[in-house]
Image (cartoon, rainbow, N blue to C red):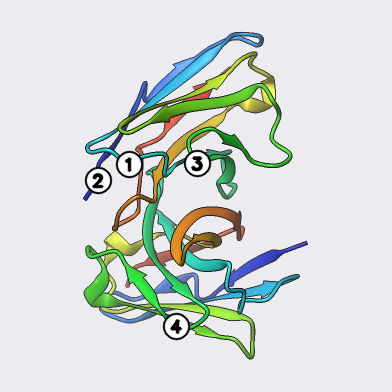
Amino acid sequence: DIQMTQSPSSVSASVGDRVTITCRASQGVSTYLHWYQQKPGKAPKLLIFDASSLQGGVPSRFSASGSGADFTLTISSLHPEDSATYYCHQTYNMPLTFGGGTRVEI
Amino acid sequence: QLQLQESGPGLVKPSETLSLSCTVSGGSISSSSHYWGWIRQPPGKGLEWIGSIYYSGSTYYNPSLKSRITISVDTSKNEVSLKVNSVTAADTAVYYCARQDSLLEWPYFFDFWGQGTRVSVSS
């Protein structure tokens, strides 16, 4: 199985801060890497697909990059509504796997 | 607008079978562009992929669960189903169904999710 490791596991930041989350795969996943945002009690929401493509309707303050085994998700200027847990997800190989999540607190 | 709605019992006894349905509205489950997946989330924990199915019935399952799960599709009802046999407390989770983009008939990212249904396993 491809293990997805996210860091940090949690981060506390202020409105307007820049936040970067890292996701590392135990083996290369090309760009078959996607990011989701989950708020408490809600289903995850797709933010980024194919490592760097912004899903429709997602604010442009979210961006992502990477390929192979190392990926980052960046929130350029934190808004109050960005308080959530963020998950990376690889679809390069079976079984599909998710990172452990990064909680962003504001 | 596409909507997915999970349904099923909120409480299941240990060793019994958990059966969930996901009704899709606002779109066809017979789309050749999509898979339909199940994902679960134990209380306070992260996401675990359970399995995915194509409208044709082709499936991919998580090996950690493969011996106990069955995912099926009913195109006449626009519905996807999940069965988990021999449940234990470890199967207690919120269960989500989600539409999954298909890349050359390979399951890809999840772009639409149901709201989830909470299932507890307890006697």
Q: Is any part of residue A36 visible from this angle?
A: yes
Disc 4: host chain: B
Q: Are marks 2 and 1 in contact (CB under 8 Å)?
A: yes
Q: Residue at x 64, y 82 (%)?
A: B78
Disc 2: host chain: A
For mark 1, does the 10 Å Cα neighbourhood hold few (<14), some (14 to 19), or many (20 or more) residues?
some
Query: Could you say which quadrant of the image residue B60 lies in?
Result: bottom left
Above/below status of A78 relative to A42: above
- C-alpha gap between disc 4 and disc 1: 26 Å
Q: Residue at x 75, y 70 (%)?
A: B26
Disc 1: host chain: A
Circle on res. A2: 2
The reply to whether label 4 and label 1 mark residues of one chain is no
Q: Which mark is first along the chain, 1 or 3? A: 1
Circle on res. B57: 4
Image location (x, y in percent) of residue B47: 40, 49
Q: Nearer the viewer, mark 4 or mark 3?
A: 3
Q: Residue at x 48, y 35 (%)?
A: A51
